[in-house]
Structures are given as structure tokens and as C-alpha cells.
Image (cartoon, grey):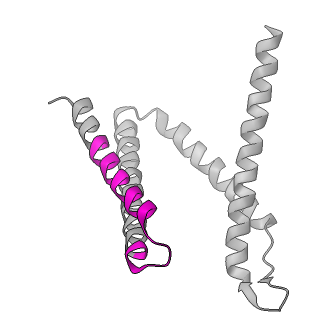
Amino acid sequence: MKLSRILQIISLVIALFAVYFFVKVSTGEEGSEALSRSVNNFIGFTKWLLIGVGLLILVFIIMDIVKNPKNLKKTLIGFAVFGLLFLIAYMISGSEAVETTNGIVEAGSTLSKRVSTGITFSAILGGIAFAGFIFDSVKSLLK
């Protein structure tokens, strides 16, 4: 059996699980124990699916590096730039505790720093992508 056929079957099974959980969550009565279990099962399924996809990506990256060691330098430079951008996002992110109007602390300074870093990092990457899009558009207009 070809690899593409196996991947199609795996994709179909994952899609069927997703439809099953979607139906269970959609038809559940709000606030019921069954809905809570369905949502927890769906979240668990999604978590394991994400971990599996991440591991598959890691395997394919390692296989590509082994097959083509010349790309290792480019890959390491890419990781270094990615890490540098993350470090910049971490340094410029705020860490103030989030409080409600009643003075109740919703998120401490550590959690606030992590969330702010994620948002800032996403904004930096989005800005780079947008700049690349504009650069490519202007370059194609000038040709």
C-alpha cells in the first residue's frame, strides 16, 4: 500500500473522530455532565493529535537534514533568528499583574509576561510576514 493511501486513511479516521466529538459537543445540554465529559475528551483528542503532528514534523525535519546535510547550516541560522526574535519579544513584553475593577488578581505577573510575550512574538512575526508581502508585491510591480 502506498504512503499516500495510508495517509488518506489516517486523515479519514481523524476526521471521523472530529465529527463524532463535534456532534457530542453540539448536542450536549449546557451545564450537563455529559457535555463536560465530551468537551474534555475533545480537548484530550486535540492535544494528542497536536503532539503527534509535532512529532511527525520533527521526524521529517531530521530525515531531511540527514539526507541533505548542506541545509543544516541554513536550518540552524533560521532557528537562531527565530530564537533571537523570541528573546526580543520576551524583553519588551510587560509583566504587570492583571486585576479586575474589584482588585481581584486575574493573572499574576509570570502569566502576564508569558501571554504578553506570545502576543508580541506573534505581532513581530506578522509584521515580518506583512513586510515580506509588501516587498514581494512592489518587486513584482517593478518587473
Residue 51 in sight here: no
Which quarter of the rendering shows the N terminus?
Answer: top left
In the image, residue 136 above or below residue 16: above
Say which residue appears at 52% left-offset and 41% top-offset. 75
Taken as a whole, is the magenta stretch helix, strand or loop? helix
| 88, 124: nearer the viewer | 124
Q: Is residue 39 left or right of residue 117?
A: left
Question: Which span is picked out in magenta?
Answer: 11-36
Residue at 80 percent across and 85 percent down: it is 100
Above or below: residue 25 compared with residue 125 = below
Compared to residue 120, the image places residue 67 above or below, namely above
- In the rendered view, tell whether residue 133 sits above or below residue 142: below
Whether 19 is among the magenta residues is: yes
Q: Is residue 113 left or right of residue 9?
A: right
- Say if the magenta span includes residue 102: no
Q: Nearer the viewer, residue 84 or 69?
A: 84
Q: In the image, what residue occupies the spot 63% across and 50% down? A: 82
Task: Answer left or right for 29 relative to 124.
Answer: left
Q: Position of residue 4 (x, y in %)?
A: 26, 30
Residue at image x 27%, y 37%?
Answer: 7
Pick whichever, 59 or 17, lies toward us.
Answer: 17
**Which quadrant of the figure has residue 90?**
bottom right
In terms of depth relative to the viewer, which is nearer, 143 or 119?
A: 119
Coordinates of residue 20 in the picture (x, y in percent): 33, 55
* Quadrant (top left/top right/bottom left/bottom right) for the C terminus: top right
Residue 135 at least partly seen:
yes
